[in-house]
């Protein structure tokens, strides 16, 4: 599937599928590289997501017809891409009631024990499908159906930095204190966004992520806090 | 050498042209809500386009210069005084160390730009000095101006006293027509809903800020309530479940899952950002072609506006 629509005066959106899958994610990744090469300096920004790429160009240098033509040519020339391996990243998580305010409620609602929720969450390998919402906020999928949970009816005003959370079949680590409506199940001591670090984020779109359950002591030793 | 912030006013933010190329790590654009007024501020001061200036919302600001330089204020009609003497906006003024610069509250429009010769010299983060408070990035400490902040700038002794004549200045009205390129999830809005959207007036609600302007008016229904999260471009108009449109601006989230009926032109979004709660908004459809022409025409006209030199009496 390849659909290209206008999105705005300086943007086109490319759809490569309709659902979340590693195969579509790989196509999104491949399309991004091809578009960067094809547009060069006419490109201002790219926003890859689950099944789409938002292409923002410089409207004083080029126009939607030229960009559309170059994008179509570049993307249709892509060979069927195998799901790229991506890097493998392990993120430690302290799963507990004191670090994940919704852990027990989620377990009860899904008819599981807390330990079952933890092992299901940490045994799955996730893929980084998109980065957005806030700097360093990585959308990871897919969460096992058994522990999927809808967003809270009333979002929290303040979710702590490092909070590990679930919304539907997505999971994420909050990179900074922010409002949020996802179900909190633990805390990760790894900083997901550090403007002073190189790279600024431990993960990129296309990477594979696994969570590793750690103890309270280990969490604190790794620099985590429980405030 | 700097301008010292005595009172930042309602909201003072350092802004350059904005942050581009960092959407992939989730950073939004920031930058001036009214690029036209911001652009003139730098052009009048003979600065590089996009030099860092202060965006002042609503007014009520007070600065003290610690250096001899030149300043210029463009945008909403906040009364400007230097040492309690009234001075025109859209004009370059010399200031000396110790001078007091005050901006009163705007009566029409609500965003102004205070620039200095050569711009404020602030270290960029991710290629830009634009302040985005939600991300705690840019400006000083990633935050709004506070009393006591020092805005670094150079000592400058020569500048032409350029001004933009009143007939060349934009006039901010209480009504704005946003030209909209239908796109994104347009197909999920029925013809009736699209007609409703384009034929009714909407009012700016209290919930309007640098992220977006939430409007109130006839609810627009969409066939779907959400989509797989995708990139959101500047000016995109989201229709959440309650049917009330939100026009997304400089500090918007980079991705989201609400359906979008189209995107407003940047030229018109600049005028939208000069509206306050209660202002009126109309939407008019425009093709991508028409938008491209409108943009180029506006840039070409702005670039060729002659600046007149003033002489001090």
Image (cartoon, coloured by chain):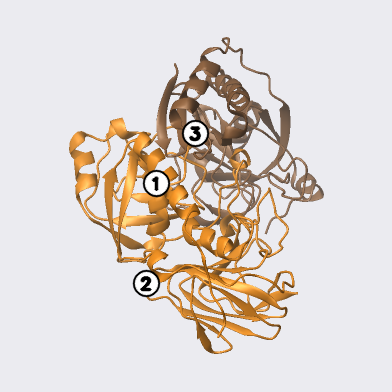
Q: Under tag 1, what secondary structure?
A: loop
Give the alpha-carbon distance from disc 3 to disc 1, as whole Å.
Answer: 39 Å
**Chain that bears disc 3:** A
Q: Residue furthest right?
A: A221
The colour one sees for chain B in the rendered image is orange
Residue B110 drawn at (x, y percent): 43, 69
Residue ID for mark 2: B108
Residue A35 drawn at (x, y percent): 57, 25
* Discs 3, 1: same chain: no
Residue ID for mark 1: B265
Left or right placement of residue B199 versus residue A212 in this view:
left
- Classify residue B202 by image quadrant: bottom left
Chain drawn in brown: A
* Discs 2, 1: same chain: yes
Mark 3 is surrounded, within 10 Å at the Cα level, by few (under 14), some (14 to 19) or many (20 or more) other residues, namely: many
Earlier in the chain: of badge 2 and badge 1, it is 2
Left or right placement of residue A180 versus residue B148 in this view:
left
Residue ID for mark 3: A148
Residue shown at 35% from the left, 33% from the top: B185
* Discs 3, 2: same chain: no
Which dot, 3 or 2, sits closer to the camera? Answer: 2
Mark 1 is surrounded, within 10 Å at the Cα level, by few (under 14), some (14 to 19) or many (20 or more) other residues, namely: many
Which dot, 3 or 1, sits closer to the camera? Answer: 1
Residue shown at 55% from the left, 55% from the top: B31
């Amino acid at each position: 599937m390849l659909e290209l629509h206008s999105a705005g005066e300086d943007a086109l959106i490319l759809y490569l599928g309709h659902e979340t899958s590693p195969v579509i994610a790989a196509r999104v990744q491949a399309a991004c590289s091809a578009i960067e090469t094809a547009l060069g300096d006419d490109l201002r920004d790219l926003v890859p997501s689950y099944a789409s790429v938002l292409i923002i160009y410089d409207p004083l240098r080029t126009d939607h017809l030229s960009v559309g033509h170059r994008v179509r040519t570049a993307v249709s020339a892509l060979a069927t891409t195998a799901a790229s391996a991506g890097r493998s990243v392990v993120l430690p998580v302290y799963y507990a009631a004191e670090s994940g305010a919704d852990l027990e409620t989620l377990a009860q609602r899904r008819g599981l024990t807390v330990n079952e929720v933890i092992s299901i969450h940490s045994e799955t390998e996730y893929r980084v499908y998109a980065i957005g919402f806030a700097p360093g906020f990585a959308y990871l999928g897919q969460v096992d159906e058994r522990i999927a949970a809808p967003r809270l009816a009333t979002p929290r005003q303040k979710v702590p930095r490092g909070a590990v959370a679930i919304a539907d079949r997505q999971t994420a680590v909050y990179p900074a204190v922010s409002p949020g409506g996802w179900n909190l199940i633990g805390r990760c001591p790894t900083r997901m966004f550090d403007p002073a670090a190189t790279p600024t984020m431990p993960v990129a779109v296309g990477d594979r992520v696994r969570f590793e359950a750690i103890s309270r002591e280990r969490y604190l030793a790794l620099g985590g806090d429980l405030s | 050498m700097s301008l010292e912030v005595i009172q930042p006013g309602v909201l003072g933010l350092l802004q350059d042209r904005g942050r581009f190329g960092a959407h992939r790590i989730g950073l939004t654009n920031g930058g001036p809500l009214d690029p036209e007024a911001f652009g003139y501020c730098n052009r009048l001061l003979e600065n590089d386009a996009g030099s860092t200036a202060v965006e002042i919302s609503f007014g009520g600001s007070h600065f003290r210069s610690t250096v001899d330089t030149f300043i210029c204020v463009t945008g909403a009609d906040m009364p400007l005084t230097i040492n309690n003497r009234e001075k025109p906006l859209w004009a370059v003024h010399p200031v000396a160390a110790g001078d007091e610069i005050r901006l009163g509250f705007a009566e029409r429009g609500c965003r102004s730009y205070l620039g200095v010769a050569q711009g404020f010299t602030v270290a960029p983060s991710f290629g830009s000095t634009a302040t985005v408070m939600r991300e705690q990035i840019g400006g000083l400490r990633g935050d709004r101006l506070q009393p006591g902040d020092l805005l670094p700038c150079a000592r400058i002794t020569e500048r032409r006293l350029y001004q933009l004549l009143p007939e060349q200045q934009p006039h901010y009205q209480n009504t704005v027509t946003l030209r909209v390129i239908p796109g994104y999830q347009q197909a999920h809005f029925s013809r009736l809903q699209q007609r409703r959207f384009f034929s009714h007036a909407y009012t700016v609600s209290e919930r309007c800020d640098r992220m977006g302007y939430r409007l109130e008016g006839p609810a627009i229904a969409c066939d779907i309530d959400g989509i797989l999260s995708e990139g959101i471009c500047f000016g995109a108009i989201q229709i959440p479940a309650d049917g009330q449109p939100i026009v997304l601006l400089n500090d918007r989230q980079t991705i989201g899952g609400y359906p979008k009926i189209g995107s407003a032109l940047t030229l018109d979004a600049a005028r939208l950002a000069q509206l306050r709660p209660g202002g009126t908004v109309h939407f008019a459809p425009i093709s991508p072609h028409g938008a491209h022409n409108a943009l180029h025409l506006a840039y070409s006209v702005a670039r060729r506006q002659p600046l007149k030199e003033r002489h001090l009496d």
